[in-house]
Amino acid sequence: MKKILSGTVAAIALIATPAMAQTNQRHYAGTGSVSIPLVGSVPVDYQITNPQPGLFGINAGQLLGELGVALEVGTRYRAVADAPSDSETATPTVNVEFSLTGTVNRDCSFYAGNTSNARNIDFGVIGVRTGNNENVNSAFEMVGPAEANIDTLTAGCNTNNSVEISKDDIRGLVNANPGGYDTDEFQANIPYSVTASWTGVALNAQTTGSAQSLVVPTNGNAGLKQQGAWRSRMDIDIVAPAVTNKGLVAGSYTGKTTLTLRAL
């Protein structure tokens, strides 16, 4: 039944005017046929607009329209709008001044993965020169540097803050159970450096962010840098240069580095 919606676009106008009646529309239309026992197929073709209750309050038109919907030979359109009247006499012009206040909590954020395992950095086997044809002055020395790179796309603080890096042992990675060894020829620790890089501003500065970094060298234990509010990617590079002046004692080497973003 093409009369239900003519054209390709239906525009709904929302209107509010004084004393205008509120919308309450109910329309039904149907076409096709229904099968009635003992009667057979009965054609259906009807339109019902805003049916109203009749005798004894029975709304026969609505019942018929809903029956057509239930039998899947009819359709229905409803539009109901309601809004309460003014609570008081309308005032064309009102001037009210509001004083607005609020606070923003100090916060620092650093996305470090979804589990604690993401923060366990394993170098695997730290290679040493194990060939039996190595010169005695090179035997058991590190083959090359051990390196780790950590980066997060979400880091920063929304107030003046400090970036702090600390190692749990200034010696770096430490073999806690090395057994006995010639201290002139071997060592049981691997020094490492830590470099953090990000985009930020100087403490109390209100300017465009620029490249910032904090370095804790191999012979350092901790470092700190104060700055203004920032948010950016942060890269952390951990580098253990190859130990070549002594051999490394066999065993497990462990260390811990802590990065702290602290609101000031």
Image (cartoon, grey):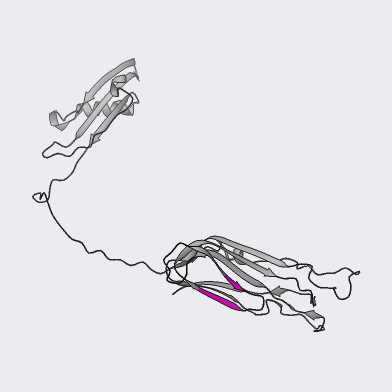
Classify 90 as above or below 125.
above
Furthest residue in direction right, as rendered: 133
Magenta span includes 219: yes
Residue 176 at what x, y percent from top left?
Answer: 71, 80
Q: Nearer the viewer, residue 53 or 170?
A: 170
Residue 11 at what x, y percent from top left?
Answer: 28, 31
Classify 61 as above or below 239.
above
Magenta span includes 184: no
In what quadrant of the picture does the N terminus appear? top left
Residue 234 at what x, y percent from top left?
Answer: 55, 63
Name the residue: 32% across, 27% down.
9
In screen coordinates, is 87 left or right of 212?
Answer: left
Q: Nearer the viewer, residue 89 or 83?
A: 89
Name the residue: 68% across, 73% down.
192
The answer to whether any part of residue 164 appears in the image is yes
In screen coordinates, is 198 left or right of 4?
Answer: right
In what quadrant of the picture does the C terminus appear? bottom left
Numbered range of the magenta stretch: 214-225
In screen coordinates, is 253 left or right of 136?
Answer: left
Res 76 quadrant in image: top left
